[in-house]
Amino acid sequence: MALTLYDNRFSTNAAKVRFLLAELGQPYEAVHVGLGPLSPAGYSDVHPFGTVPALRDGDLLLFESNTMLRYLAMREGRDDLCPAAARERAVVDQAMDALSLSVRPALWGLEEVTIYAAVPPHLGGDDGALGDPALVASRAAALGAVLDGFEAFLAPLPPFTIADCAIAGRLATVPRLPLNLTRWPHLARRLEAAWARPAWAAQLAAAPADPGDIVPA
Ligand SMILES: N[C@@H](CCC(=O)N[C@@H](CS)C(=O)NCC(=O)O)C(=O)O
């Protein structure tokens, strides 16, 4: 059955799903959706929060990127990517949960005062903070403290799973941020390995064209 991904090339949450779709060699239709106030009229009929991504598989609609990763891997019977055994699965889920619940807020805190600082507040940015070095330093320190802890979540992970799709996708902005990854060896190794995979380049190429959106997230 055909899959549809409601997608935006600036969306790091969509990149997580594109990465896995490319790993699986799974064909799908990509539908570009503007972010936030740029989303098209009627998109709330697809996604109850109006955010990106959403995934349609026949009459099944999914709204959370981590759920999409689990679903797509399980749909293809890929226990190597989404382990069936409870203990192995727990470490994968734990890393994905920590990424969304702890890393993402701290990461956004730094993104919004650096790479997205020129985006106006009504579109999700914080242009008032542009160029405030003390704020950037404190947000970088806050993210650094979270990443110090995140290392322990990464240590027990298998070589490549859906957790890596999530981590590589959501942290795709890291090379543009004032962070030195050498402080987090597990994270640096995983990101380097994930971003070197052919499926990572394939997902970048598969991102839908952007007819003028300016809001990354
Ligand atoms: N928990 C959701 C978060 C989705 C999300 O926040 N998406 C961003 C793009 S990465 C978005 O649509 N932002 C626009 C908005 O919040 O209106 C997921 O993981 O799928």
Image (spheres, rainbow, N blue to C red):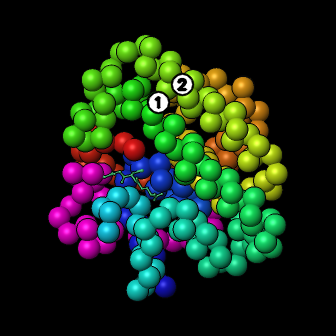
Q: Residue at the spot x=74%, y=64% of the render?
A: 90
Amino acid under disc 1: Leu
Using the numbered discs, state the Cα–Cα distance from disc 2 to disc 1 in whole angstroms. 6 Å
* Residue underneath mark 2: 140
How many tags in the picture? 2
Up the image or down, 39 lies above or below 58; here it is: above
Give x and y (percent) for residue 104.
52, 44
Give x and y (percent) for residue 161.
71, 59
Sequence-wise, the earlier of marks 2 and 1 is 1
* Residue underneath mark 1: 110
Give x and y (percent) for residue 214.
28, 40
Query: Is residue 30 on the magenta stretch?
Result: yes
Q: Secondary structure at mark 1?
A: helix
Q: Residue at the spot x=51%, y=37% of the render?
A: 106
Q: Which mark is residue 137?
A: none
In what quadrant does ligand 1 lie? bottom left
Quadrant containing the C terminus is: top left
Q: Residues within 10 Å of mark 1 (few under 14, many from 20)?
A: many
Query: Is residue 133 on the magenta stretch?
Result: no
Up the image or down, 131 lies above or below 99; here it is: above
Q: Residue at the spot x=55%, y=62% of the render?
A: 66
